[in-house]
Image (tube, rainbow, N blue to C red):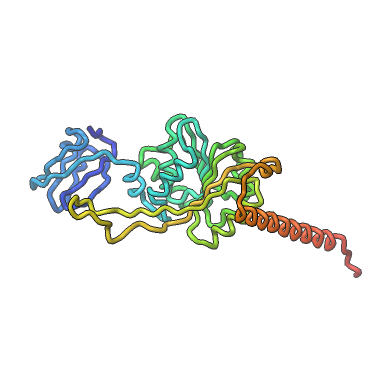
Amino acid sequence: MPAYGELALIATPRGKRVLRRIEENQDMHTQDGILRMADVAAVPYGSEVLTSLGVPFRIQRPTLADLIKGVKRQTQILYPKDIGYLCARLGVGPGRVVIEAGTGSGGMTIALSWFSGPTGHVHTFEAREEFHRLARRNLTWAGLGDNVTMHCRDIADGFGDVRDADALFLDVRTPWEYLRHIPAAVSPGAALAFLVPTVDQVSRLLLGLEQGPFDDVEVCEILVRRWKPVADRLRPEDRMVAHTGFLLFARHQERSETWNAFRSLGTRERKQEAARLERIERLGQSDRSEQSDRSGDDATTDPA
């Protein structure tokens, strides 16, 4: 049964669902009457409690999805459909160290803390002070965060002293600008994930990942279509949760010529690999040209 100080999910016959902390003498006043917290604390989860007007309210234990949807937010948070797949692909769990950059309102941080358990650990980075404070409050509100270290800093110069992390998730506007800092912060073979909303961002990130040391790249999006739960008239709902963002996955992995020599590639894959190598060579030539130009400028003296 819910104890004082815990969050409970309170559902009404009208379809409303409210997350409410059970506090002594802090009764809930609604249009359906007063719900006494003493009555709520006296019954097991899953019970129905009558208000002062005799309306039944159901008392349920909140799930992770309920907590994520209930946070106070100043930024767009991830949907549970994306969070579940991200955590599974990143291998978030006991004993794992995970880096998150772009804490925002802390929805994903709550999930990472939940899955990591007491033996896992999360390092989350947020550049903006107001979002950092809000995420800290949301973690405390959700009863989580003991396994989270919150860093209020920009990752433009890297991830500080964090080393050998098992996984990393970037939810920032220009993730390709920070790829160079990843190898120093994660262990070889670490799982990586990125979230971007637009196709242009996906293309730029893919170009950055091509230059390594990254491999096993995947791009996907997750769509959820609910169905009307009527046995004799089963059909899809009229609306669905469609595109919310592109998810990109990769591994921190050095590529090798030996590995490539044993890969089985079809005609299309061979053309794609040749185009990738050509792009890398072209970028390398461009970088060398820029360095040469800078060296020439440095060597030039002012005749005056």
Drawn side of residue 163 relative to residue 95, left or right: right
* Residue 235 placement (x, y as % from top left): 25, 56
Residue 177 visible within the image: no
Query: Dividing the picture into quarters, in which one does residue 260 lie?
Result: top right
Residue shown at 24%/34% (left/top)? 2
* Residue 192 placement (x, y as % from top left): 54, 44
Drawn side of residue 223 relative to residue 233, left or right: right
Number of numbered discs visible in the structure rendering? 0
Drawn side of residue 9 relative to residue 175, left or right: left
Residue closest to the far bottom: 304
Residue nearer the viewer, 147 or 87: 87
* Residue 207 placement (x, y as % from top left): 62, 56
Q: Vertically, is 80 above or below 38?
A: below
Residue nearer the viewer, 181 or 33: 181
Residue shown at 87%/64% (left/top)? 300
* Residue 100 placement (x, y as % from top left): 51, 44
Residue shown at 42%/37% (left/top)? 115
Q: Vertically, is 93 above or below 301?
A: above
Residue nearer the viewer, 103 or 211: 211
Residue closest to the far right: 303
Residue closest to the far front: 267
Q: In which quarter of the image is the N terminus?
A: top left
Q: Quadrant of the C terminus?
A: bottom right
Residue 96 visible within the image: yes
